[in-house]
Image (tube, rainbow, N blue to C red):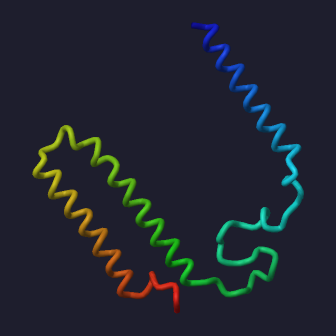
Amino acid sequence: MKILIMMTMIIYLILILLTTILNLISKKSFYDREKSSPFECGFDPKTSARLPFSLHFFLIAIIFLIFDVEITLLLPLIVTMKISNIFNYSIILIIFIFILLWGLFHEWNQGALNWIN
């Protein structure tokens, strides 16, 4: 058993070293402006900091965070499904999904989801 654990540790170490060495000798390791800039941040970090920030990008990011947090609230419902009453579980789940859809419909009516403004 100890030999098996030791062998897997050695294999993991070899794989880590190989990927590190390949990363260091890669042709794409030269300095690139696109690699140092944030991904889809809404502005260029190399220019003036006083440029206006896209409010539409901010609203989409907030909507994404809200739905992401609400998805994490749905995960415990899966675990509690085994120990709860199926009628109560169904009512709670329907109310929760209704609130999500109501919020999405509200954002849609407000125009926050339209990219062509």
Looking at the image, is 80 positioned above or below residue 6? below
Q: As drawn, is 108 to the left or to the right of 30?
A: left
Front-lying residue, 79 or 4: 4
Residue beneath the point at 41% across and 65% down: 67
- The quarter of the image holding the N terminus is top right
Looking at the picture, how far across and down is residue 104, in whole percent? Answer: 35, 75
Residue beneath the point at 79% across and 31% down: 17
Looking at the rendering, which quadrant does residue 4 occupy?
top right
Looking at the rendering, which quadrant does residue 79 occupy?
top left
Front-lying residue, 30 or 74: 30
The tally of labels here is 0
Looking at the picture, how far across and down is residue 84, in whole percent? Answer: 16, 43
Residue at the far bottom: name it: 117
Q: As drawn, is 98 to the left or to the right of 33?
A: left
Looking at the image, is 74 positioned above or below residue 25? below
Looking at the rendering, which quadrant does residue 94 occupy?
bottom left
Residue beneath the point at 88% across and 44% down: 25
Q: As drawn, is 75 to the left or to the right of 63?
A: left
Residue beneath the point at 56% across and 78% down: 57
Looking at the image, is 111 positioned above or below residue 76? below
